[in-house]
Each structure stands twice: as structure tokens, then as C-alpha cells.
Image (cartoon, grey):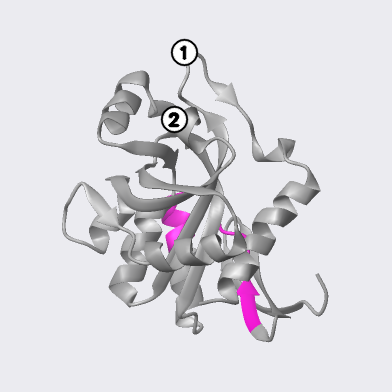
Amino acid sequence: LEDVVQVGVTRSVNGDIIIYKMNYKGKDIGFYMTPVGGSFATGTLEEIIAMGAEKVIVYGSCGSLDKNITAGHLIVPTDAYRDEGVSYHYMKPSDYVTIEKVDKLTSILDDLKIPYVKGKIWTTDAIYRETIGNMQKRKAEGCIAVDMECASLAAMCKFRGVEFFQFLYSADNLDSEKWEKRILGNLDLSERERYMMIAFEIASNI
């Protein structure tokens, strides 16, 4: 990436999160590495929104709940099950938060000819309580993946009036008798770059 400059920083006891900016296809785009977990990710994004962010694209890894649906596709959440705490500080209680910009995002992915699948996902704080029983309940409701941030970030952005877009890619598979693990560290650089470039393409079209 050329012409990338540092434009800001958020600070925490876990270290600084650097915010960068670059011009991509004539549009200035800010970007940073989102922390893992709804609370940390939401607190960080709150500060970045206070700096002036009006549209947010979040992408990252998730666990697949149905490999037959998600294999080889990006995952576009339509609704996120609120099995976390942050979203309840931004929205009234409900089982799900609806992701509002799905049609716009999928239209862009269609134009880019990038394969994707839409569906409900399950956001949880407790990665070691993604039990078979809980997984089966979420699958029965139509969830196709599990993550740790979507419900929290979507609720906060809705509260703040900020446009929120998210896509995910499968990093492990819970849809088996034994946990099939594919951590981010196993991705080669070209695959990581591919997801980042998809995010830049989306940003240039919203």
C-alpha cells in the first residue's frame, strides 16, 4: 500500500491502536486493526466515531456453523444473535440485532463478482462456551456462523447513526463432531491482502 499515513491513535492499557489513512480510487479511507471482542472493539470504534467516522466497514474471521453453506464464500450477516453484553447498552432487549446495510453491501459484492452467502450469525463473548447444545440452538434458528463483535458493533452504530457494513470469512468449523481449527495465522499474505482489498473496494463504493 502506497501513500499510507498515520492520522490518529486510540490508547488503552493493552497498547496503542494506530489509525491510518490512504487514498484509494480518489477516496480517503481510514483503517485500523479492530480489537477482538465486542467490548474492546466497540469502545475503540466509539472513539473513532468521535474523531469523525461516518461509515464503518468491519471484516474478520468467524466460526462456520454450516460448512456446506459457507465454504468458499464471504459471509454477510443479516442479523446477529445477541449473546453478549454490549448491545444491551445501546438497544432495547431482543434476541437479534438486524444489520441495516445488507442490500447495499451485497450489491457491491455482486458488482465485484465476489461469492458470498447471507444469513444470521451468533455473536458471543464466551468462546469456550460455544458448546454443541448452544450451537444446535443457533443453527436451528438459521445461524450460519459465530463471531465475537457483530451484534455489539451493529447496535452501537445504530445508536450513533453511523452506517455499518460487515463481512466475515470462516476461520474454523464448529459444524463437525470435533473442532476443525483454521486460525488466521494459517492464512498466507495474499489471502489476508485479498480481504483487505475487498474492504477497500467496498469503501470506495459507499
Q: Is residue 60 left or right of residue 124?
A: right
Residue carrying label 1: 177
Mark 1 or mark 2: whose residue is earlier in sequence? 2
Q: Secondary structure at mark 2?
A: loop
**Disc 2 designates what residue?**
66
Residue 204 is left or right of residue 120, and the answer is: right
- Is residue 36 visible to us here? no
Which span is picked out in magenta? 28-42
Name the spot of residue 152 as percent of width and height, x first.
36, 56
Q: Residues within 10 Å of mark 1 (few under 14, many from 20)?
A: few
The residue that appears at 28% across and 57% down in the rendered structure is 98
Please tell me whether mark 1 sits on a helix, a strand or a loop. Answer: loop
Residue 184 placement (x, y as % from top left): 66, 40
Q: Is residue 62 magenta?
A: no
Name the residue type under label 1: Glu
Give the residue type that dot 2 points to. Answer: Asp
The quadrant holding residue 196 is bottom right
Residue placed at 47% from the left, 25% from the top? 174
Judge whether 152 appears above or below 161 on screen.
Answer: above
Examine the image and state in which quarter residue 89 appears: bottom left
State the image quarter where residue 59 is shown: bottom right
In front of the other: 104 or 199: 104
